[in-house]
Image (cartoon, rainbow, N blue to C red):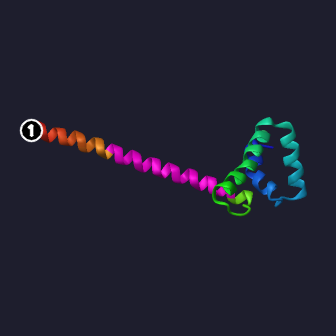
Amino acid sequence: MDCNVIRDLLPLYQDEAVSEETKKVIEEHLESCEDCRRYYDEMRHIPHSLEDADGKGKYRYSEVVDMLKKRTVLEYSIGAALLVTSVAGIVKAVLGTDKRWR
Ligand SMILES: [Zn+2]
């Protein structure tokens, strides 16, 4: 079983939304794969920190992972926007210098 497949299934496993068969495959993989075990440990700690942050109730792990994915996309978008802004700033500065030279 591929590690990425296991990691995709872990939130569902934590929510107990997988079949007995899948559960067994995941448990067997976790026993033999230290990387996925660590990933699973980290994943299980995420909702606790969210709970502490805004005092809300329980999250479903699949929702949390979705949220994290969306947040990552959002962070990338903000990063890209900032990059465009700074590039525009540099272009403006260079053009401004150009005008002064003329
Ligand atoms: Zn693995």
The answer to whether residue 65 of the structure is visible from this angle is no
- Give the secondary structure at mark 1: loop
- Rendered residue at 57%/54% (across/down): 71
Question: Which residue in the protein does label 1 denote?
Answer: 102
**Is the CB atom of the residue marked by disc 1 within 8 angstroms of ligand 1's nearest atom?**
no
* Relative horizontal placement of residue 42, taking residue 79 as reference (left or right): right
Mark 1 Cα within 10 Å, few/some/many (few <14, many 20+)? few
Q: Position of residue 23 (x, y in %)?
A: 87, 53
Q: Give the range drawn in magenta.
A: 64-87
* Relative horizontal placement of residue 99, taking residue 26 as reference (left or right): left
Magenta residue check for 86: yes
- Rendered residue at 68%/63% (across/down): 56
Q: Where is residue 81 in the image (x, y as percent from the top left)?
A: 41, 50
Q: How many marks?
A: 1
The answer to whether residue 47 of the structure is visible from this angle is yes
Furthest toward the left, the residue is 102
Q: In which quarter of the image is residue 36?
A: top right
* Relative horizontal placement of residue 47, taking residue 97 as reference (left or right): right
Q: Which quarter of the image is occupied by the C terminus?
A: top left
Q: What residue type is labelled 1?
A: Arg
- Rendered residue at 74%/60% (across/down): 60
Q: Which quarter of the image is occupied by the N terminus?
A: top right
Magenta residue check for 72: yes
Q: Position of residue 35 (x, y in %)?
A: 76, 37
